[in-house]
Amino acid sequence: MHELTSDIVPPEVQRGEVNTRCMLYLEKAKAAYSTCTQVHIACDPSQHHEETLVSIVYSHQVGVAAVPAIQVVPKVHFHELEESLAGLMQERRLKRLAAYGELRAVDSALRSLGLGMETFKTPPSIICRPLKAEEIRVKCPITGRFKICSTSTGEWVDQVPQTVDLSELPLLVAWMDQGSVGTAAMHYVVGLGHQVHLNGEKFHRVGASDCLTHPART
């Protein structure tokens, strides 16, 4: 493009036009996703001089797919970790430091579309935590809904209140490479109380990696 048009349009003007088009595209995507609470994201980081994450997002609620801003996966430094992770790092129990960097890249990609991991935080009215020692979880045979019962007080509470509209419940479905880094990143988010469902991206690993490595081994 530079060789063909530099005699007409200076390269810096070309770059400015490309940047403007990207910004307009992302602003249009933000408007499309402004009411979305359920989103699918497929992403996979690869090495392009530096680790780069490319992804695509789709929401069935509005029937729109978009490509978020490409992200450079940042290297994680100790002082950037949250307190819980920093403690594990000091104890040498944190084995997936790269997962934290990938998680930040996914969050930034979603933010470029006006979303972000906090969009998928579990509503406080829903009981989404391990049961306490005195609690039991029972399925009502009539309604099919689950209730949490406290054996100490005898109190019964709906795990998901009937006022909650499940069709609007925040949910992120993440399609990622089945490597341990992406898996660890999403499981960490689930532990923070976010509504995330992780699907292994089968075609990348089974179709590409196995076909390439199997002949070499034989």
Image (spheres, helix red, strand yellow):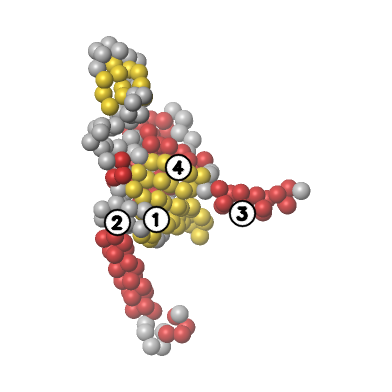
Residue 177, x across and y down, in percent: 52, 48
Depth-wise, is mark 2 or mark 3 nearer the camera? 2
Mark before the other along the chain sequence, 2 or 3: 2
Q: Secondary structure at mark 3?
A: helix
Whole-number angstrom distance, CA of label 2 to CA of label 3: 32 Å
Whole-number angstrom distance, CA of label 4 to CA of label 3: 20 Å
The residue to which callout 4 is attached is: 198
Mark before the other along the chain sequence, 1 or 4: 1
Quadrant of the rendered structure where residue 146 is? top left
The residue to which callout 1 is attached is: 57
Residue 25, x across and y down, in percent: 32, 67
Residue 45, x across and y down, in percent: 48, 53
Q: Secondary structure at mark 1?
A: strand
Q: Residue at x 61, y 52 (%)?
A: 207
Mark before the other along the chain sequence, 1 or 3: 1
Extreme residue in the top direction = 152
The crowding category of the residue bearing disc 2, from other C-alpha atoms within 10 Å (few below 14, some 14 to 19, many at least 20), is: many
Q: Residue at x 31, y 71 (%)?
A: 20
Mark before the other along the chain sequence, 1 or 2: 2
The residue to which callout 3 is attached is: 208
Q: Amino acid at mark 2?
A: Tyr
Q: Residue at x 42, y 41 (%)?
A: 197
Q: Amino acid at mark 3?
A: Ala
Q: Amino acid at mark 4?
A: Leu
Query: Which label sits on residue 33?
Result: 2
The crowding category of the residue bearing disc 3, from other C-alpha atoms within 10 Å (few below 14, some 14 to 19, many at least 20), is: few
Extreme residue in the bottom direction = 7
